Image (tube, helix red, strand yellow):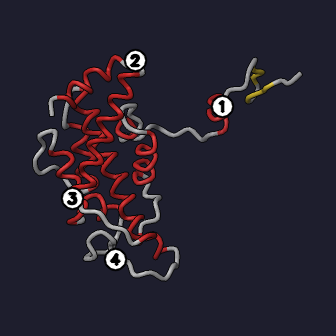
Amino acid sequence: MTIWKVGNRICSKFSTKAVWENIRRARPPVYWARFIWNQAVIPKHRITSWLFMLNRNPTMDRLVSWGIDLENCCLLCGNSPESRDHLFFLCPYSVRAWENAIGVLGFINPPIQWELVLYWLSSVSTNPAQLAAILQLWHGSIYVIWQERNARYHNGVTKPHFMLSREVIKLAKDKSMAMCSCGSDFASSLVALWSSV
């Protein structure tokens, strides 16, 4: 008979969560956690955004700092060194994709500097459905811009910025519909919001 023991406690069944809680080093929650781990956001978008929050994705500036012999130039605009802060959304290409996406919710001239976007997210809306839609667009923009950057780096394939915006909006609407079909009460107000734009 198998016995699971987590710490000094014998468990009746295996729990990944219990093991994780036992082995991890607990830290106080970060202020941006609620922006990243929102259930209205597509999981792969959340993971990508989380890695960018930690500044762990291999942007050109990081690759160069690891000693890789590369020219540190943004693959999207070709004008500036590539970094997380440049990609989201100081780059002339990515800022157009971001502004077009968030513009469908009526936001004109949203912040474009990384830290200012985070500050803006914390105060932009008290309406839960609207905040969820904003987060869907923010995460989606980060994800598709990173995909576009990687497609250019690995395959030499490019898309115009407006195609990225359309993709972000479609993904947000599709996620909302999927949540609704799974029976989420919250999703109905999110779908209603997306139906009105």
Give the mark nearest the N terminus, 3 or 2.
Answer: 3
Assess whether mark 4 and mark 3 are in contact (beta carbons under 8 angstroms): no
Mark 2 neighbour class, 10 Å CA radius: few under 14, some 14 to 19, many 20 or more = few
Which label lies toward us, 4 or 1?
Answer: 4
For badge 3, the amino acid type reads Val
| Residue 61 shows up from this direction | no
Alpha carbon distance from label 3 to label 2: 35 Å
The mark found on residue 16 in the picture is 1
The numbered mark, 1 or 3, whose residue comes first in the sequence reads: 1
Label 1 is placed on what type of residue?
Thr
Q: From the top left corner, tell me how far across and down residue 112 is, in percent.
A: 21, 55
Q: Nearer the viewer, mark 1 or mark 3?
A: 3
Q: Is residue 97 above or below residue 139?
A: below
Point 30% across, 50% down: residue: 141
Q: Looking at the image, is mark 2 or mark 1 earlier in the sequence? A: 1
* Closest to the observer, 179 or 25: 179
Query: Which residue is labeled 4 in the image?
Result: 73
Three-letter amino acid code of the residue under disc 4: Cys
The disc, 3 or 4, on the residue closer to the chain's N-terminal end is: 4
Which residue is disc 3 drawn over? 95
Mark 3–mark 4 distance (CA, rounded to whole Å): 17 Å
Q: Amino acid at mark 2?
A: Gly
Q: Quadrant of the C terminus?
A: top left
What is the number of the mark on residue 183? 2
